[in-house]
Amino acid sequence: MGTDAATQGLPRKERERLAHRREILEAAERVFARNGYRGSTVEQIAQEAEFAVGTLYNFFKSKEELYEEVLASLVEQALAAFRERVLGEADPVSAVGALIELRIALLDEHKGFARVVFQTPMAEHGDALLALPPRCLALIEEAQAAFTQVLQRGIAAGVFVDMAAGDLVVCLQGILNAFVAQWLLREPQEPLAERVARLRGIVLGLILRKKD
């Protein structure tokens, strides 16, 4: 989580503090993924990070805060990658393909923790999105608004089906979320590249405007 480039120019003690914080969050993600939310403890996370429990409490006051910070960190990383890989595509069709590839790649990289997000008591509303901290929801809304503009360009150019861009975003999100949920419940047998290609074909087959 995080990059060394972001800490360049900071005093040594501050760099060390941020490095320790990142190590704790990475350890917390592994423990939550392995033991689930309820089965994880601050003591387990401290042991995984190789820190004393008291040291860990200097950074985070509770398991709940650790969980939210892991979530927030992953959402922030995903948004940074989204800006670079998806919004960096000038062609709307390529941007859709980049989004699909990014979503599946992130799922593969963090699938253990993703399962916890869907299973945690905080998600008992029936919608895992509602379990996210407000700042995570704000970042997701920011990404959704930016992607709506990408789809709007494609609709205006006659590339995508003629419908409201906001509705098209909702439809696209629903398809991606359905596949993500399925792959979280049942381990996919297909390699990453095959899943990306299959889902890209499904999505583009639905949203590309048919030529007369």
Image (cartoon, grey):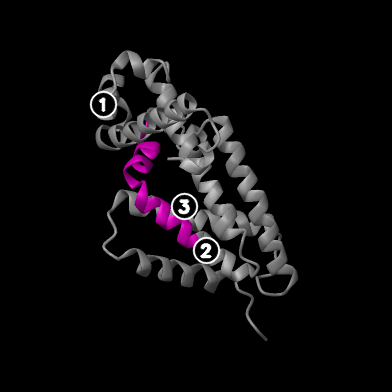
Q: CA distance from mark 2 to mark 3?
A: 16 Å
- For the residue pair 33 and 175, the one nearer the viewer reads as 33
Marking on residue 98: 2
Q: Is residue 116 magenta?
A: yes
Distance between the Cα atoms at labels 1 and 3? 35 Å
Residue 15 in sight here: yes
- Give the mark nearest the N terminus, 1 or 3: 1
- Give the number of the mark in front: 1 or 2: 1
Residue plotted at (53% across, 74% down): 205
| Residue for badge 3 | 177
In the rendered structure, which disc, 2 or 3, sits on the residue that comes first in sequence?
2
Point 67% across, 56% down: residue: 148
Q: Is residue 130 magenta?
A: no
Image side of residue 19 versus residue 32, left or right: right
As shown in the figure, which amino acid type bears the numbered disc 2? Answer: Ala
Judge the density around disc 3: few (<14), some (14-19), many (≥20) Cα neighbours within 10 Å: few
Q: Position of residue 202 (x, y in %)?
A: 47, 70
Q: Secondary structure at mark 2?
A: helix
- Work out which residue is located at the far top of the displayed protein and give it: 54
Query: Which residue has dot 1 on it?
Result: 50
> How far is mark 1 from mark 2, CA to CA?
37 Å
Residue type, label 3:
Asn
Which stretch appears magenta?
100-120
Locate the N terminus and report the quarter of the image it occupies. top left
Any mark on residue 209, and which?
A: none
Q: Quadrant of residue 210?
A: bottom right
Q: Is residue 93 left or right of residue 129?
A: right
User: Is disc 3 placed on a helix, strand or loop?
Assistant: helix
Say which residue appears at 73% left-offset and 73% top-offset.
Answer: 157
Q: Neighbour class for label 1 at 10 Å: few (<14), some, many (≥20)? A: few
Where 85 falls versus 203 (above or below)? above
